[in-house]
């Protein structure tokens, strides 16, 4: 790097950074992406595009970012099949970020669809392909400092995880430590509640009880797998982000089990509303670091965890908690969570000798939904429904309905749907796990080809379902799960009698009781 240069450390930029011959806007050749950004107020950088992607008809992109004394601004150009920037300048593509500890770049340029996608069967796609893409989504938009770590992770995953030895150890921990398999429970009283008004019939509702796992959520499936992988790679330290605290608790748990140092980043707002989980993480030996930047929620926790990983990648593994981020994370998290759908298929065959008709799950980053969906993606007779957070309403800035209201863009190293209000600060949900302004790239892909449906539920609707499920089934669901349960009000009247609906009960609501008390008075 040039003398006096500094390296921004947040992965929210357009930077495939593979082509060393690419010439940046300021005329600098041979330096890719982040490395050309300097302290000078007059210098700018242009992220190098990927010659590999270009030769395959994929994306070409550049992002010019200008640093001033107190802030950083960017204006980006992007070209990709069926995608173009909605504006060349303005609040959607010219975002300011304050300096903090060596300067932070946080850019998520808004893109819009250029033309309709050609209808293709989902089975005709490789998910992901060799470039880490699901259709046009996914990929690696990272600075050079992370390319080595991501490549090391991908190579280790491909070499180790498919082996019989790894799978045997992984499933042994799922059985004896996590407590799998989780039940597929017939919710008899919810089913009765959603009968037709004349009592003649309605759908049959089942809950996949991930809330009964050790630590109380689906998150433990992924953290067990990634901790085993980190141990094989020789990593002694783990960093992670958390919103609702469920991923943080699961990460702290496996670190305690395997003797790994653990640092959890959590937005200061989430630290307050998830105090019980913060205590659990500390009790398990983790260091919890509150994040006071930005919205003080999940997005900012991801930023901090990534910055930590950039600086310590030689000794640290980042256990990302959802199907987001640069390749190979969306694939790794999905594959470790896919046990949910595999069990569901087997249990459905046992219970009614068939498949579910409808699968439904809440969707923030999307790991619990993808874990349920993945086994059935190619079963086109099974409906896949993801339910997002509408917050105070999608007609207000206070929501987190990324797939319902977002546009295509890049956030935290991956091309996907994002919410961009010009500053990425308006996202909101009563649920700390759903207020992320992005979503996993495979969900974006499933939406675009029409394989999955995505809807949104407000805070008040989720609170009502939270109470209803507790009163009818004796199950207090996480507020995240309550969003999926709330969509039954809209879905059930449209379904034929006897339709088998499986909802992923992704976590239990112990963590949310204090917040519910405040909200309900």
Image: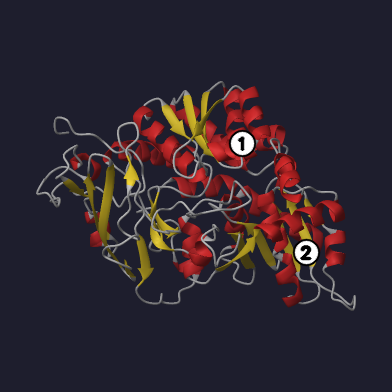
Up the image or down, 282 lies above or below 436; here it is: above
Up the image or down, 90 lies above or below 37; here it is: below
| Nearest to N terminus: mark 2 or mark 1 | 1
Q: Nearer the viewer, residue 390 or 202?
A: 390
Q: Quadrant of the N terminus?
A: top left
Up the image or down, 242 lies above or below 17; here it is: above
Report the coloring of the rendering: secondary structure
Left or right for 311, reference 288:
left
Q: Residue at x 26, y 56 (%)?
A: 75
Left or right for 200, reference 342:
right
Q: Real-space Cα distance between discs 2 and 1? A: 46 Å
Q: Residue at x 37, y 27 (%)?
A: 312
Q: Can residue 508 be seen in the rendering of this structure? A: no
Task: State the image coordinates of residue 336 (x, y, percent, origin top left).
Answer: 56, 44
**Circle on res. 272:** 1
Return the residue at label 2.
Answer: 353
Left or right for 157, reference 470:
left
Residue 247, quarter of the rendered image: top right
Q: Can residue 108 be seen in the rendering of this structure? A: yes
Task: State the image coordinates of residue 229 (x, y, percent, origin top left).
Answer: 49, 33
Q: Nearer the viewer, residue 46 or 173?
A: 46
Task: State the image coordinates of residue 74 (x, y, percent, origin top left).
Answer: 27, 52
């Amino acid at each position: 790097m040039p003398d006096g240069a500094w390296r921004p450390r947040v992965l929210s930029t357009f930077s495939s950074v593979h082509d060393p011959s690419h010439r940046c806007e300021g005329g600098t050749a041979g330096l890719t992406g982040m490395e050309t950004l300097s302290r000078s107020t007059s210098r700018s950088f242009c992220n190098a595009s990927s010659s590999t992607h270009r030769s395959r008809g994929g994306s070409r992109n550049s992002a010019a970012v200008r640093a001033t004394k107190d802030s950083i601004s960017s204006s980006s150009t992007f070209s990709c099949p069926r995608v173009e920037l909605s504006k060349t300048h303005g609040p959607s593509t010219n975002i300011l970020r304050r300096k903090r500890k060596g300067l932070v770049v946080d850019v998520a340029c808004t893109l819009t669809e250029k033309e309709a996608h050609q209808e293709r069967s989902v089975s005709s796609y490789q998910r992901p392909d060799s470039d880490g893409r699901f259709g046009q989504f996914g990929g690696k938009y990272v600075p050079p400092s992370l390319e080595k770590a991501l490549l090391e992770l991908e190579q280790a995953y491909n070499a180790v995880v498919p082996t019989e030895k790894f799978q045997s150890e992984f499933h042994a921990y799922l059985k004896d430590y996590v407590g799998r398999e989780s039940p597929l429970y017939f919710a008899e009283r919810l089913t009765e509640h959603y009968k037709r008004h004349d009592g003649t019939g309605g759908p049959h509702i089942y809950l996949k009880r991930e809330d009964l796992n050790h630590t109380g959520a689906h998150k433990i499936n992924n953290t067990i797998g990634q901790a085993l992988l980190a141990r094989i790679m020789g990593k002694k330290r783990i960093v992670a982000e958390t919103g609702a605290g469920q991923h943080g608790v699961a990460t702290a748990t496996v670190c305690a089990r395997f003797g790994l140092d653990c640092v959890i980043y959590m937005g200061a707002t989430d630290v307050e509303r998830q105090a019980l989980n913060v205590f659990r993480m500390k009790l398990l030996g983790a260091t919890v670091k509150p994040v006071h930047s930005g919205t003080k929620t999940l997005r900012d926790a991801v930023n901090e965890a990534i910055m930590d990983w950039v600086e310590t990648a030689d000794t640290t593994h980042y256990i990302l908690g959802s199907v987001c981020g640069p390749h190979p994370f969306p694939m790794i998290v999905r594959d470790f969570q896919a046990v949910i759908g595999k069990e569901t298929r087997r249990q459905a065959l046992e219970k009614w000798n068939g498949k579910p008709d409808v699968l439904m799950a809440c969707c923030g980053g999307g790991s619990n939904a993808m874990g349920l969906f993945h086994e059935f993606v190619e079963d086109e007779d099974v409906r896949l429904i993801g339910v997002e957070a509408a917050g105070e309403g999608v007609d207000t800035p206070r929501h987190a309905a990324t797939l319902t209201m977002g546009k295509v863009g890049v956030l935290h190293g991956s091309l996907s749907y994002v919410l961009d209000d010009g500053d990425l600060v308006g996202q909101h949900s009563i649920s700390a796990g759903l207020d992320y302004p992005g979503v996993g790239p495979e969900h974006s892909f499933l939406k675009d080809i029409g394989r999955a449906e995505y809807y949104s539920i407000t805070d008040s609707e989720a609170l009502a379902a939270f109470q209803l499920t507790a009163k009818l089934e004796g199950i207090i669901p996480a507020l995240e799960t309550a969003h999926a349960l709330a969509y039954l009000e809209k879905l059930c009247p449209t379904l034929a009698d006897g339709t088998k609906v499986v909802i992923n009960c992704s976590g239990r609501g112990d963590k949310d009781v204090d917040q519910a008390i405040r909200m309900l008075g």
